[in-house]
Image (tube, rainbow, N blue to C red):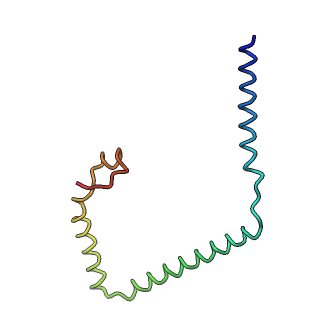
């Protein structure tokens, strides 16, 4: 009899604590000034990113064809050279914190 009451009491306390912790987060409200500041910052960041992309596109457009071909060839060559420094699949899957190569 005593152990049954103890189990019910423990369950009730756990449910009460869980409900209090879950509802506590919902009562916090963000002030309007903070939300508007965050929106303005996000808009500025988006605009800066767009300007950067346009600058990169313009830079690529003014490159000569020979430069574009050279860059493409160097990228392929770099891939081949860096292949020997790549870790094995097993090592990358099961030891992600280890950053050393072979």
Left/right placement of residue 48 relative to residue 59 reads: right
Q: Is residue 5 above or below residue 15?
A: above
| Quadrant in the rendering for residue 64 | bottom left
The residue at 34%/46% (across/down) is: 95
Residue at the (67%, 70%) spot, across then down: 38
Q: Is residue 6 left or right of residue 88?
A: right
Count of marks overlaid on the render: 0
In the rendered structure, the answer to whether residue 43 lies left or right of residue 2 reads: left
Q: Position of residue 49 (x, y in %)?
A: 53, 76
Q: Quadrant of the N terminus?
A: top right
Rendering coords of residue 82 (x, y %):
25, 63
Measured as percent of width and height from the top left, residue 84 is found at 21, 59
Residue at image point 26% right, 80% down: 70
Using the image as rendered, state which of residue 3 and residue 15 is in the foreground: 3
Above or below for 18 versus 50: above
Of residue 20 and residue 62, the one placed in the foreground of this image is 20
Instruction: Give the answer, above or below, for where 74 lies relative to 5.
Output: below
Q: Quadrant of residue 77?
A: bottom left
Q: Nearer the viewer, residue 32 or 4?
A: 4
The quadrant of the picture occupied by the C terminus is bottom left
In this picture, is 11 found above or below 46?
above
Q: Residue at x 58, y 75 (%)?
A: 45
């Amino acid at each position: 009899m005593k152990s049954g009451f103890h189990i019910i009491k423990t369950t009730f306390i756990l449910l009460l604590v869980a409900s209090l912790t879950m509802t506590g987060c919902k009562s916090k409200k963000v002030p309007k000034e903070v939300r508007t500041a965050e929106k303005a910052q996000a808009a500025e960041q988006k605009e800066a990113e767009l300007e950067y992309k346009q600058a990169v596109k313009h830079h690529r457009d003014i490159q000569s064809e020979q430069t574009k071909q050279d860059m493409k060839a160097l990228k392929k060559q770099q891939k081949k050279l860096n292949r020997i420094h790549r870790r094995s699949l097993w090592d990358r899957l099961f030891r992600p914190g280890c950053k050393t190569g072979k």
